[in-house]
Image: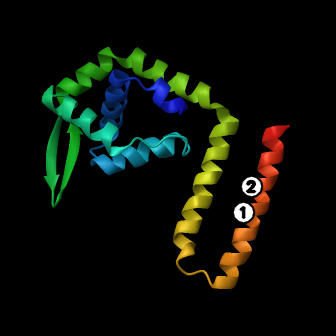
Amino acid sequence: MIAKALVARGDFKMIVLAILQERPMHGYEISTFIEQQAQGCYRPSPGAVYPALRALLNKGYIRIKSEERRKIYQITPAGRSLLKEKHAQIDKCIREFREAIGPERAKLMGEMHKTAKLMVIAGRDLTPAQAKKIGQIIIEAREKMLKVISE
């Protein structure tokens, strides 16, 4: 995927640190925030987020503030200093990511993401007749997409 190629290990840690500069968050919130910023084009796995958090924690750039059963991560003064030092690197990474996706693909991925969320939310309450109709709509849409892709 585009995002994985652009977000090198060090860059990803800096992006996580920059996100935590906005406000303290737990790991899942960080992953969701990145996905929202990427318009659904990229959602980092827990296997990417938590090792980055652990590395930042070990270097003293973030600390844990426990809140009930969740670990809330927040940036430290050392983390803020590192962000100032690496500001150009982070901006470059974010700019390259946005350019690689392009506004049209980002919008498309956002629309697909909204449709998937709708199906998850509404899917539980669909009648068999509604499920059949929506299934047919999806088949027709997929066939139209294949025609566009093959042009």
Residue under the point 42% across and 15% down: 88
32 to the left or right of 81 = right
User: Which numbered disc covers residue 138?
Assistant: 1
Q: Is residue 57 above or below residue 120?
A: above
Residue under the point 21% across and 30% down: 56
Q: Position of residue 99 (x, y in %)?
A: 61, 25
Q: Which residue is mark 2?
A: 142
Q: Is residue 148 above or below residue 127?
A: above
Of residue 81 and residue 2, the one placed in the foreground of this image is: 2
Q: Which amino acid does the dot numbered 1 rest on?
A: Ile
Separation of disc 1 and disc 2 at Cα?
Answer: 6 Å
Q: Position of residue 60 (x, y in %)?
A: 14, 28
For the residue carrying disc 1, how many other residues have a C-alpha within 10 Å: few (<14), some (14-19), or many (20+)? few
Q: Position of residue 66 (x, y in %)?
A: 14, 52
Mark 1 in CB contact with mark 2 (< 8 angstroms): yes
Residue under the point 33% across and 22% down: 10
Badge 2 marks a residue whose secondary structure is helix
137 to the left or right of 9 = right
Of residue 27 and residue 86, the one placed in the foreground of this image is: 27
Q: Is residue 95 above or below residue 63?
A: above
Tell me the colour scheme of the image: rainbow
Res 51 quadrant in image: top left
- Location of the C terminus (image quadrant): top right
Q: Which amino acid does the dot numbered 2 rest on?
A: Arg
